[in-house]
Image: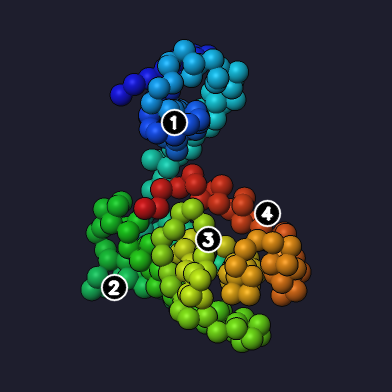
Amino acid sequence: METVEFGGITCFVKRSSRRTVCLRVRDDGEAEILAPRKASAAEIVRLLEGYAPKIAAECEKNRQLAAKREAFALDYGSRVRFLGGERVIRAGEHGYVGYDSTDFYVPPSLSDDGIRAAVVAAYKQAARDYLNARVTVISDKMGLEPLAVKVNSAISHWASCSKKSSLNFSFYCMMAEPEAVDYIIIHELCHMREFNHSRKFWAEVEKYCPDYKRYRMYLRDLWREIRTEKWE
């Protein structure tokens, strides 16, 4: 693969029909340049060399995050976040995967990857039950009726609303405190009235969640913590 060096940084180069040069840092801590096919290495360096200190710092930060993710492990007896509290991972009988008010249950004698996959399955099961119930309560108060409520493994956003009014939630929502989950639900339901992020949309959110700005900050900080963990 083509590379260029500047400021002590080695960057991988991906060329395409794009017209501009773009520099980004991957999650593994490597720097990557997206460049036009005809741009020379000298031209790329000239455009980007002033960003070297900032990029070097970002690469180091992402390398540290990547190392933490690789070191992340779950075991029987480990505690995981759940709606502002914790659940303990327990070995269940007969390959059972599920949850109750205090624990997550997974099959016994699993590998590290197996435990993680089973815990994610328990999260998704809990998310389907909890989110369907909360969406029903909140949507009734707002006078709305979403088409469906689904749970997925999205890592780029907490939730989304389709143009057909289907709500999709990441199972990671279950790691947040209940009030923040309610804000996520309200946010997506408001898209049924305003399919954008205009002032009118945020006014609608504030009507049902006056403290929405605080929850946005809380969720941003929580996501930074989750990024240091390897869930899937």
Distance between the Cα atoms at labels 2 and 4?
37 Å
N-term mark: 2 or 4: 2
Q: Which mark is residue 217?
A: 4
Mark 1, residues whose alpha carbon is within 10 Å: few (<14), some, or many (≥20)? some
Q: Circle 2 is placed at which residue position?
A: 96
**What whole-number distance in Å separates the C-alpha atoms at marks 3 and 1?**
28 Å
Query: In percent of the image, x 60 and y 18: which residue is there?
Result: 50
For the residue marked with disc 2, what is the amino acid? Answer: Tyr
Q: Secondary structure at mark 4?
A: helix
Q: Nearer the viewer, mark 4 or mark 1?
A: 1
Lower position in the chain sequence, tag 3 or tag 4: 3
Q: CA distance from mark 3 to mark 4?
A: 13 Å
Residue ID for mark 3: 158
Q: Are marks 3 and 1 in contact (CB under 8 Å)?
A: no
> Which of pointers 3 and 1 indicates the residue nearer the eye?
1
Decide: few, some or many residues near mark 3? Use Cα within 10 Å; few <14, some 14-19, many ≥20: many
Is 175 drawn above or below residue 207 in the view shown? Answer: above
Separation of marks 2 and 1 at Cα, in angstroms: 47 Å
From this view, report whether residue 152 is shown above or below residue 45: below
**Residue 2 position in % (x across, y down):** 34, 21
Residue at the image position 52 percent from the left and 64 percent from the top:
159
- First-in-chain label (3 vs 1): 1
Quadrant occupied by the N terminus: top left
Task: From the image, tell me which residue sits under label 1.
Answer: 34
Q: Amino acid at mark 4?
A: Met
